[in-house]
Image (cartoon, rainbow, N blue to C red):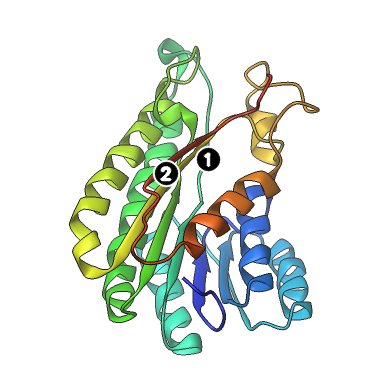
Amino acid sequence: MDLRDKAAMVTGASKGIGRQTALDLAKAGADVAISARSKDLLDSLAAEIEKAGRKVLVFAGDMSKEEEIKAFIQQTVDTFGKINVLINNAGLGHFHPVAEMSTQHWDEMFNLNVRGLFITTREALPFLRQAGEAVIVNVVSLAGKNAFVNGGGYAASKHAVLGFSRCLMLEERKNNIRVLAICPGSVTTNFSDHQPGLLAPEKKALKPMDISETIIHAVRMPQRAMISEIDIRPSNP
């Protein structure tokens, strides 16, 4: 896909992978709608997107709430008139032994990581289909394939997202929508602060730009070629 003058949505765009991907989409020529809970961080990103010469929509909201998801999508369509690319990046993790995990933490992870991603995708699909050529990128995690101590809730949510992504790919390819599930390993982001002892040392971990560059490359592939799943991990952790 040629990203020039396309419209992209990025959830969880205030930091890390989401922020870098939104900025790189703009540098590739796309207008970008960005969402997260922190308006201040979104406004800072929006200024950089505008410096790249692209339009930007800022939506400060909670992507685990259906009404806010619907509002974000509607504002995107009202602003840009279309949606060509959807980057589902919003997510959170709580890391505790199963015996000590609260129901609240479990529900928070599934409400955002799984339910929110599902609603965002479902509500965006009519517009993605109308685009004639579209891409959905679900930022999963290697936790969607692997088990680790204290990761029962987070890994379960990411296994769910990976299964959802695989089914979605099979359903939507006939509508000229390519679906990519990208599964990063250790990445130096704020999210990493909540996973002590689980990550590669910072100097060996991936950077958000590594994930973003991979996403941009996959999106830019011609319509005939779909990269449906990518594992990306530190070379020598």
Considering depth in this image, is 156 or 102 the residue closer to the camera?
156
How far is disc 2 from disc 1 in space, using C-alphas? 7 Å
54 relative to 152, above or below: below
Q: Position of residue 113 (x, y in %)?
A: 42, 44
Q: Position of residue 53 (x, y in %)?
A: 72, 83
Instruction: Give the left or right position of residue 172, taking residue 233 as reference.
Output: left
Percent x, y of residue 85: 45, 68
In this rendering, does residue 154 appear at all?
no
Q: Residue at x 51, y 75 (%)?
A: 2
Rendered residue at 68%/56% (across/down): 20
Residue ID at (63%, 53%): 213
Left or right, 146 with reference to 28: left
Foreground: 10 or 2?
2
Give the residue number, with chain letter if any, for mark 1.
Answer: 92
Question: In the depicted view, which residue is nearer to us: 5 or 77?
Answer: 5
Please, is residue 189 above or below residue 3 in the view?
above
Residue 113's disc number: 2
Q: Earlier in the sequence, mark 2 or mark 1?
A: 1
Are circles 2 and 1 on residues that touch, CB within 8 Å? yes
What amino acid type is highlighted by mark number 1? Leu
What residue is shown at x 64% (from left), y 29% (from top)?
194
Which element carries disc 1, helix, strand or loop? loop
Name the spot of residue 224 as percent of width and height, x first: 33, 63
Looking at the image, residue 194 lies above or below residue 42: above
Crowding near the residue tagged with mark 1, few <14, some 14–19, many ≥20 C-alpha atoms within 10 Å: some
- At mark 2, the secondary structure is helix
Q: Amino acid at mark 2?
A: Asn
